[in-house]
Amino acid sequence: MSEVRGCNLPEELYYLVDKHVWAKPMEDGTLRVGMTAVAAKLAGSNLAGVTVKAKNIGQEIAQGKSMATVESSKFVGPVPAPVTGVLLRGNDQLAADPNIVSRDPYGEGWIAELKPANWEGDKGSLVTGAEGIAAYQAKLEADNISCS
């Protein structure tokens, strides 16, 4: 796990940096996706809700389009899909405790699972490893964002 400007960023995830979302390939070919620690910090520390709309389950969501909504005392906005894919399910734990996203954004705080339409093609628009961390560092510095 790398830390950039106080923000934790696991090297093994794939990031859509401008949208502050990540994707983690699972063994069954699906992706677990969520908000980065940066997004959680920007949304605020007391999340009122993170919801995946039931009507979107089974539907294809385009990369960068909303797959969920996050709501806090200072922000209401979309959680974009990091890649194009069919939305399989949301994280049911978020209904009872949306702040899992702030406490553990890369573990228990994942937001949804997607079946990617073209993982091999779409992952080229994401960054991972040292390249991902460097890209995130440049974004955080350019936008003067810190998680600490």
Image: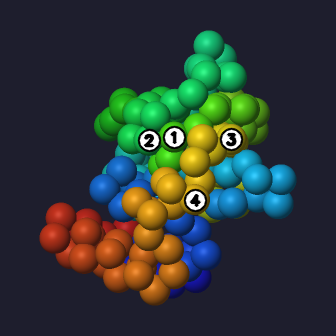
Mark 1 — residue? Answer: 84
Residue drawn at 41 percent across, 81 percent down: 131
- Residue 63 tag number: 2
Q: Are marks 3 and 1 in contact (CB under 8 Å)?
A: no
Q: Secondary structure at mark 1?
A: loop
Amino acid found under the numbered disc labelled 4? Glu
Residue under pointer 3: 115
Q: Amino acid at mark 1?
A: Thr
Tell me the amino acid under the disc marked 2.
Gln
Identify the element where label 2 is drawn: loop
What's the CA distance linking mark 3 and mark 1? 9 Å
CB within 8 Å, label 2 to label 4: no
Q: Secondary structure at mark 3?
A: strand
- Residue ID for mark 4: 120
Quadrant location, the C terminus = bottom left
- Across and down, in percent, residue 98 comes to 61, 39
Residue at 69% x, 60% y is: 25
The residue sitting at 82% across, 60% down in the picture is 27
Where residue 81 appears, as percent x and y from the top left, is 49, 42
Neighbours of disc 1 within 10 Å: few (<14), some (14-19), many (20+): some
Mark 3 or 4: in front is 4
Query: Which of 130 and 10 lies nearest the eye of the viewer?
Result: 130
Q: Earlier in the sequence, mark 2 or mark 1?
A: 2
In the image, what residue occupies the spot 38% across and 45% down? 43
